[in-house]
């Protein structure tokens, strides 16, 4: 794992109820996070393959 992957792996995003935090912003953050997880799973070897 290179440094970029390590940093991305340890990234935690916390969003709370504050001015400027919209439903659209939260929905976008969740969707982006989900997409990142799905992409990482696609690149991972299947159980038993590795």
Image (spheres, grey):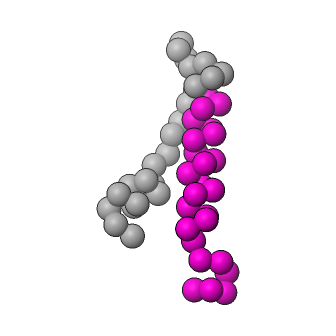
Which secondary structure class fits the magenta region best? Answer: helix
Question: With 8 as the anchor, is 43 left or right in this view?
Answer: right
The C terminus - image quarter: bottom right
Residue that lies at the very extreme toward the left in this rendered image: 3
**Residue 33 position in % (x across, y down):** 58, 45
Q: Nearer the viewer, residue 39 or 11?
A: 39
Residue 49 lies in what quarter of the image? bottom right
Residue 3 in view: yes
Q: Position of residue 38 (x, y in %)?
A: 63, 56
Q: Nearer the viewer, residue 10 or 2?
A: 2
Residue, x 35% and y 57% (percent of image)?
4
Residue 24, given in percent of the width and then of the height, sits at: 63, 23
Q: Magenta stretch containing residue 10, yes or no?
A: no
41 left or right of 11 in image: right
Residue at 49% in and 45% down = 12
Q: Position of residue 1 (x, y in %)?
A: 39, 70
- Residue 17 visible to the viewer: no
Which corner quadrant of the image does residue 48 belong to? bottom right
Q: Nearer the viewer, residue 12 or 25?
A: 25
Residue 9 to residue 50: above or below: above
**Residue 28 included in the magenta stretch of the image:** yes
Name which residue lies at 53% across and 36% down: 14
Question: Which stretch is magenta?
Answer: 26-50
Relative to 25, does residue 40 appear above or below in the rendering? Answer: below
The residue drawn where x is 56% and y is 61% is 40
- Given residues 40 and 9, the one toward you in this image is 40
Q: How many numbered dots are placed on residues in this image?
A: 0
């Amino acid at each position: 794992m290179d440094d970029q992957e390590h940093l991305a792996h340890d990234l935690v995003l916390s969003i709370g109820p504050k001015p400027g935090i919209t439903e659209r912003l939260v929905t976008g953050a969740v969707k982006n996070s989900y997409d990142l997880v799905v992409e990482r799973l696609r690149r991972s070897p299947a159980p038993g393959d590795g």
